Image: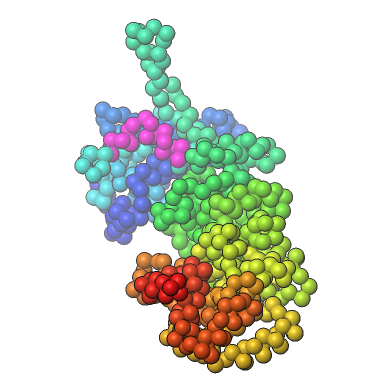
Amino acid sequence: METKQFKAESKRLLDMMINSIYTHKEIFLREIISNASDAIDKLYFKTLTDTSIGLKKEDFAIQIIPDKEARTLTVSDNGIGMTEEDLENCLGTIANSGSFAFKKDNDLGEDVDIIGQFGVGFYSTFMVAKEVTVITKAFGSDKAYKWHSNGVDGYTIEEAEKENAGTDVILTLKDDTDDEKYSRYLDQYQIQTLVKKYSDYIRFPIKMDVEHTHYGEDENAEPEKHIVNETLNSMTPIWKKNKSELTDEDYNNFYTEKFMDYMPPIAHIHSKNEGAATYNALLYIPSHAPFDYYSKDYEKGLQLYSSGVMIMEKCSDLLPDYFSFVKGLVDSEDLSLNISREMLQHDRQLKVIARNIERSIKNELTKLMKNDREKYEKFYEAFGLQFKFGIYQSYGASKDTLEDLLMFPSSFEDGKMTTLAEYVDRMKEGQDCIYYACGESKARIEMLPVFEKVKDKGYEVLYFTQDVDEFAIKVMMQYKDKKFKSIADGDLDLESEEEKEESKKTAEESKEMFDFMKEALGGKVKEVRLSTKLKSYPVCLSSEGQVSIEMEKVLNSMPQNENNKVTAEKCLELNASHPVFGKLKELYASDKDKLTEYTKLLYSQARLIEGLDVEDPVEFAKLICNLMV
């Protein structure tokens, strides 16, 4: 019997495919089952136009037969089968797919959904098998053939015996090694797991003899063992059913089982899309964050199916990072899957699907916010931080998508969560800024010297208690033409015209004293000036420029910035209405050395109020002692 050689390019492709194209060896079973499903599809479609065939859909099945003694795994179908010419063309030339030709040339005049149109999937068997045998008989033929190969060395084709039409693919598994236990693919549980994972929604039953053990009431009796030819796959995907057929319980049960979550989701999105990209999607918004969600170990992505066959466990390209919490799947019939079902990085249709999914998620969250605020706030507590990171990390590019989903606690109704739209709707007449304050907590913010003056003026203040808050707002710059303004900024413009004139006059009178105090601080502040935003406190720090005092604290707390400290431009502001201010004026006229000490004390006090460290604790302690004596 003549051994035929693969073409040179086929040899190279086979070697490359076995060693690099597929990420996981276990997908070989998915490929063989998909090919078997294709073969049944072809014969099933013939029955639709030729009633003489006498077969119904329920007559078709795929059988899996593991044999541990012989170390063989057989996948058998009763589909269309292959002729000798088919074997030569489809298995002798790698990447020449009979399914693809059938899809183009079927006589039904329609685009039949055939999943095995990739041409190389069959050869993934050589990742786990040292030899592969295919015994096949074409429907309507009286001859059967056997194709056999040990891999790149070539293949043989000869006549064989087979009673009925269909194809048996017999894998003789490689010997086990220290690194790889190929015999696990003969294990009953492992086969069941792989079928459930990759091929659960193949539309024909995938069957296997499964051993069951029955324990009787007599504890001393030997347990009874019996074999049942079970169907391993569920066949009908929930996402292909009509919404009217499904209840919330159906959706929730699928979620908790499929994505192994002990809690039901907050919401689900079930959509079917046709057009530039045709696909079904079933997405879930979880009720809580997994333990590793905000760590580098978390892996985002949706399950990706092609006509019910899972081709990727986590397709990260389908979700932007700021929606990485979403679980679910996408099933498309028309993805361009080149060489391997796993090479999708540059697929145009995938990008269209991703854009549509992003829009669907935003719409669902917006609906949840409007219709069930309590649920949305629960969701936001778990995942809202991701929206802020999304805005900051995209340098504001994702602002339009995310800004209306943001929420912050605010001074309105004692710290309750509010959206930016709600804040703007409540703004006072003539107010042109959205005010915010940064701090570790609501209580800490409300102790800031500036806070009481802003509150007295009747302005609502957003509480920024998370490190990323101000960074995100800085890149947003504004919301609905309203600029964001920190109450720690130098100019809050809270005074009336009369107050401004009075402050201007006092500032001019105190200019020389302010210059002296600035000099006493040795360049630690850009300016010492009169404050227009203090009520009962004598002093505060304000900042100018793009880096605020709060941002300085956050950036300098990061390990990578340990040797490259960031400094905000600070101004020391004094309250002219406070008794301390009068004392300072008195010392400027009579005791400048004492004024220098008081200036340093006030500066350290202002730093402490802002949550900054005292720069020189020893000097600070001495100044306190001097004051006490």
- Residue 367 vs residue 510, the one in the foreground: 510
Q: Position of residue 289 (x, y in %)?
A: 51, 48
Residue 196 lies within the magenta run: yes
- Where's residue 594, x and y in %? 46, 83
Q: Where's the C terminus, which quadrant?
A: bottom left
The percent position of residue 512, horizontal first and vertical second, equals 54, 93
Q: Residue at x 42, y 33 (%)?
A: 192
Residue extent of the magenta highlight? 182-197
Quadrant in the picture for residue 173: top left
Left or right for 489, reference 220: right
| Residue nearest the viewer, comparing 501 with 411 | 501
Membership of 161 in magenta stretch: no
Determine whether, in the image, residue 196 is placed left or right of residue 22: right
Q: Is residue 532 above or below residue 368?
A: below
Q: Is residue 219 above or below residue 382?
A: above
Instruction: Name which residue lies at 42% across and 75% down.
Output: 626
Residue 439 visible from this viewpoint: yes
Q: Position of residue 272 (x, y in %)?
A: 64, 50
Question: Which residue lies most toward the left here?
Answer: 178
Name the residue nearer the viewer: 389 or 185.
Answer: 389
Above or below: residue 555 compared with residue 349: below
Prevailing secondary structure class for the magenta stretch in the rendered image = helix
Residue drawn at point x = 48 percent, y = 47 percent: 290
